[in-house]
Amino acid sequence: MSGNHDHDHHHDHDHPHPGVKPEDTSAPGRYELITLAMQEMLIEKGILTPEKIRRGIEALDAWQPSRGAAVVARAWTDPAFKAALLADGNAAVSKFGVDMGEAKLTVVESTATVHNVIVCTLCSCYPRALLGLPPDWYRSKRYRARIVSEPRKVLAEFGTVIPDDVAVRVHDSLADLRYLVLPKRPAGTEGWSEEKLASIVSRDSMVGVAVPNP
């Protein structure tokens, strides 16, 4: 599965929302089982150790959405950087010391006529190098299923109502493909510094379930 889904139905918060519940008590999916099996095999072969895995998880925990927010703020203030970001996300974010590894980063711009939102319908692929660990609701099967079939309704549950004349595009991440939303810059922020602009860019707005609010 790849690409994006265009929807023309109706859509900032960093916590669970009505209808987008994080509880997921179902058995692990195929990709989760593959990951666990690979981890066990690498440990058995001595390539990885539980200690290395723990340190890797700690490193992931230390990543913050502020890295992505700084990238967005630069794109809002520097047209040349914005063009480079949209053309080659990996190369552009490397200027901020962000290494996306083997995954391709595709940046999608929300405008006055298009609102973008991200999901991973297969598991929970997410631009962690830019945004840190994904929230529980992003990993939940409920969000993964509903955002594709009824995006405007789900976004409204996040408090994000998208006008009827604005198209909603849902982008489906893959193991080797990550998306980042470049939100529409709010009116009234002209002349703001990059630091001040970055302060209004939330993790949720870079996923597309929220919009920056000055």
Image (spheres, rainbow, N blue to C red):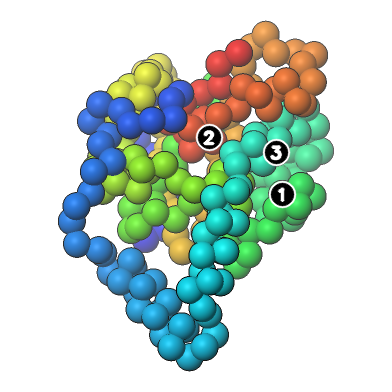
Q: Which residue is mark 3?
A: 71
Q: Nearer the viewer, mark 3 or mark 2?
A: 2
Mark 2 lies on a secondary structure that is helix
For the C terminus, the quadrant is: top right
Task: Specify the farthest residue to the left.
Answer: 26
Of label 3 and label 1, which has the lower sequence position? Answer: 3
Label 3 environment density (alpha carbons within 10 Å; few <14, some 14–19, many ≥20): many
Q: Which residue is mark 2?
A: 203
In terms of image quadrants, where is residue 184? top right
Pick the residue in front: 42 or 3. Answer: 42
Q: CB of mark 3 within 8 Å of CB of mark 1? A: yes
Q: Nearer the viewer, mark 2 or mark 1?
A: 2
Q: Mark 1 belongs to which amino acid? A: Val
Q: Is residue 25 left or right of residue 68?
A: left
Query: Against 129, is 212 above or below?
Result: above
Query: Against 90, is 184 above or below?
Result: above
Q: Mark 2 belongs to which amino acid? A: Arg
Residue 92 visible (yes or no): no
The residue under the point 43% across, 25% down is 13
Give how far across and how far down residue 36 sits, in percent. 36, 73
Give how far across and how far down residue 93 sits, in percent. 71, 49
Give how far across and how far down residue 141 sits, in percent. 26, 48
For the N terminus, the quadrant is: bottom left
Mark 3 lies on a secondary structure that is helix
In terms of image quadrants, where is residue 166? top left
The residue under the point 71% across, 30% down is 73
Q: Which residue is mark 1?
A: 93
Q: Is residue 79 left or right of residue 159?
A: right
Task: Specify the farthest residue to the top.
Answer: 188
Query: Against 213, is 39 above or below?
Result: below
Mark 1 lies on a secondary structure that is helix
Q: Mark 3 belongs to which amino acid? A: Val
